[in-house]
Image (spheres, grey):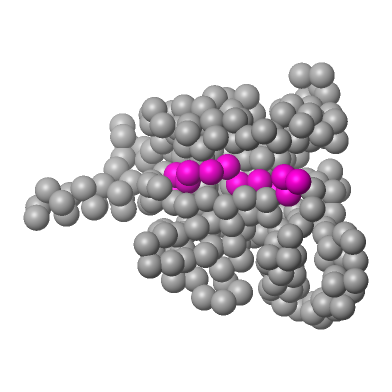
Amino acid sequence: MGRRLLRQLSDEMVYPENGHCVSAYAQLARRDELSIMSEVVDSLPVIKSKMQDPTLKYTLFVPTNEAIERLESWEGWEESKATLKEVFGSTRLVRAYMVSYHAVPNMTLTLEDLRNLDGDEAFLEDYLNNVMPLYVNVTDDDTRIVGLGSHASVVTPNIWACGAILHTIDHVLLPFDGDDELDPMQVELLYDATDALRQREGLPPLNRSDIDASDDPIEVVGAVNISEVPTEWTQAAYEYDAND
């Protein structure tokens, strides 16, 4: 009983090391199953510095090595990656774009918090701030994080890191649709997510008939290009040369 309690506490507390708490970047770097994500962050100096900052508060969903390898083995990945690089002009910006979609600013949400989100609260505004927020879908035995083009289940929850908290996930969350064609379920989720955010901002609800009649639901709900609204995590990527 005592050993089990100690294991539970180690997941819920940030133990100081040399008088300092453990940063999110350090938590990535010390875990073998997150080594690929750690290498990705190493290539993004400003995001790395954010993850080393003990004062920042956020929730980060971290794809495991297996999750990233699963994405790379997807038959549509090479084409999608080439398209993203063409759009953004830089592999580094694509990486910043993808990583930012996995982080929720100003909130440290434990697994219990995620499972207790109710109604529109289940839509989480990520650092990317583009297209569709993340959606938390809970069942009895699963906590699933849903993006526009993919979903992932929480594998290891509650990895504390100073003011932040990390949860490992079994898939990479995609802020775009893989086949570039939203199915009815994706359209419904996009509609609900956008209306939830509009309600938070005191804006009137969307006109559902406009979405149903459109060939491009994303355009109707008002999604914008990431280059027009860079967040603090993605902004730094624009400093790099397009050929880097």
Q: Is residue 174 magenta?
A: yes
Q: Residue at x 31, y 40 (%)?
A: 16
User: Toward the viewer: 174 or 6?
Assistant: 174
Residue 235 shows in the view: yes
Q: Residue furthest top?
A: 243
Q: Residue at x 84, y 63 (%)?
A: 217
The residue lying toward the viewer, choosing from 92 and 68, is: 68
For residue 179, side relative to residue 114 (left or right): right
Residue 75 image position (x, y, % from top left): 67, 33
Look at the image and give the residue range highlighted in magenta. Answer: 164-179
Q: Position of residue 65 (x, y in %)?
A: 48, 32
> Above or below — where is 137 with respect to 90?
below
Q: Main secondary structure of the magenta part?
A: loop
In the image, residue 184 sits, relative to residue 226, either above or below, namely below
Residue placed at 47% from the left, 52% from the top? 153
Q: Is residue 156 magenta?
A: no
Q: Quadrant of residue 48?
A: top right
Seen from the viewer's position, the closer of residues 79 and 106 is: 79
Where on the picture, by quarter, is residue 198? bottom right
- The residue positioned 50% from the left and 58% from the top of the image is 144
| 240 displayed left or right of 41 | right
Residue 219 at x, y = what percent? 88, 60
Question: Quarter-wise, where is residue 43 in the image?
Answer: top right
Question: In this rendering, is residue 172 above or below 91?
Answer: below
Q: Quadrant of the C terminus?
A: top right
User: Which quarter of the rendered picture does the N terminus lie within?
Assistant: bottom left
Q: Is residue 68 above or below residue 226?
A: above
Place of residue 169 in the rendered image (x, y in percent of width and height, measured from the top left): 47, 46
